[in-house]
Image: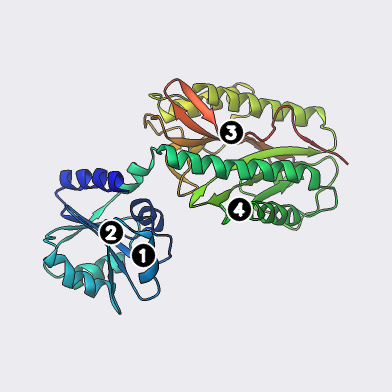
Amino acid sequence: MRERIERLRARLARENIDAMLVMRPENRYYLSGFTGSAGALVITAREAYFLADFRYFEQAQEECPFCQVIGFKESLYDTLAEKLPRWGVNRLGYEGDFLTYKQAVTLQEKLEKTPVVPLYGLVEELRQVKDPGEIELLSRAAALADQAFEHILGYLKPGMTEWDVAVELECFMRRLGARKSAFDIIVASGPRGALPHGVASQRVIQAGDLVTMDFGCVYRGYNSDLTRTVVVGSPHPRQKEIYDLVLAAQRAALAAVRAGIKACDVDRAARQVIDSAGYGENFGHSTGHGVGLAVHEEPSVSKKNETLLQPGMVITIEPGIYLPGWGGVRIEDLVVVEEEGCRILTSAPKDPLPEVPV
């Protein structure tokens, strides 16, 4: 935590900011270790203060050893107005993309002569490169998703609903130690596979369907994200054709990942494979995104993002093809960027197209 706080202090000094108010849950946890749902972290040039109300005061004392924990009874902003002058804060930064406009106006009104300055992406930028401890937690979250997929291959049967499958996936991951699902689980079968974000419905899965499952879990604050498409029974030739094309696109992108490459060039590697086969219009989303304390974070692996990938970044690679009225295929893995390539954290089977016995 200390090293993370020091890196933030260096950024604040360059911005001529005396202190930063941190309230976004992922950022607050990253800098303090606090897992509760409410509280405020103030990072000054010399100290880190955690402001907690009665509900979380004791928890903050236990979880935030690098912070001075201060309790408040009523208004957080009134407490800040009292404390900031004592801490020598003349310019306060806050998360401009987290506080609402009304909250920011109220904060400025309460602080009167202390200017408040919106800051964008300072902590999120620090979070992009994971340390070894973070990568280990992401690996564990990925392993839980892998195990859930192996389980669901033996569980899924024609006649079940997509909802049945989603519930079983979540329950299985939680039984293994996950805190919760990383997001609303996608189970898109048959024609619904053409919906990239086809959250599980009451549609009954049938023999011959392709079924795309996109899921993950939260383990000790860190997320996993895995997508596999399976066929119920044996694949028809076109199902296999589309699946193998998406798999080839994913492999091209995985082969492109390394430190120093632009994120957009990784996206291009996948997109060229699909474009050359005539399905470019059916791949309408980015090739991937960062994963960490949030399941979707920077860097985006997209057409326009020229961010250079760095060792320790954790991203997804997830090309897909979506054909209205027919269905779709997506294959997604979680990878760590390394100097000479990448290390894949997820290991659920994908080659050949996984088949569910009927």
Question: Residue 102 sits in which quadrant?
Answer: bottom left
Label 1 sits on residue: 60
N-terminal-most mark, 4 or 2: 2
User: In 3D space, how far apart are the residues under numbered discs 1 and 3 (Cα atoms)?
Assistant: 41 Å
Circles 4, 2 touching at the beta carbon (< 8 Å): no
Instruction: Indicate the amino acid at tag 1.
Output: Ala
> Which residue occupies the extreme bottom position in the image?
74
Circles 1, 2 touching at the beta carbon (< 8 Å): yes
Question: Residue 98 sits in which quadrant?
Answer: bottom left
Q: Position of residue 321 (x, y in %)?
A: 64, 35
N-terminal-most mark, 4 or 3: 4
Instruction: Indicate the amino acid at tag 3.
Output: Pro
Residue visible at 45% across and 49% down in the picture: 293
Label 4 sits on residue: 177
Q: Which mark is residue 319?
A: 3
N-terminal-most mark, 1 or 2: 1
**Element on which disc 4 rests:** loop
From the image, state whether disc 1 or disc 3 is nearer to you: 1
Left or right: residue 283 versus residue 207 is left
Q: Residues within 10 Å of mark 3 (few under 14, many from 20)?
A: many
User: In 3D space, how far apart are the residues under numbered discs 4 and 3 (Cα atoms)?
Assistant: 29 Å
Instruction: Indicate the amino acid at tag 2.
Output: Cys
The residue closer to the viewer here, 319 or 25, is 25
Residue visible at 20% across and 67% down in the picture: 108
Quarter of the image containing the C terminus?
A: top right
Label 2 sits on residue: 67
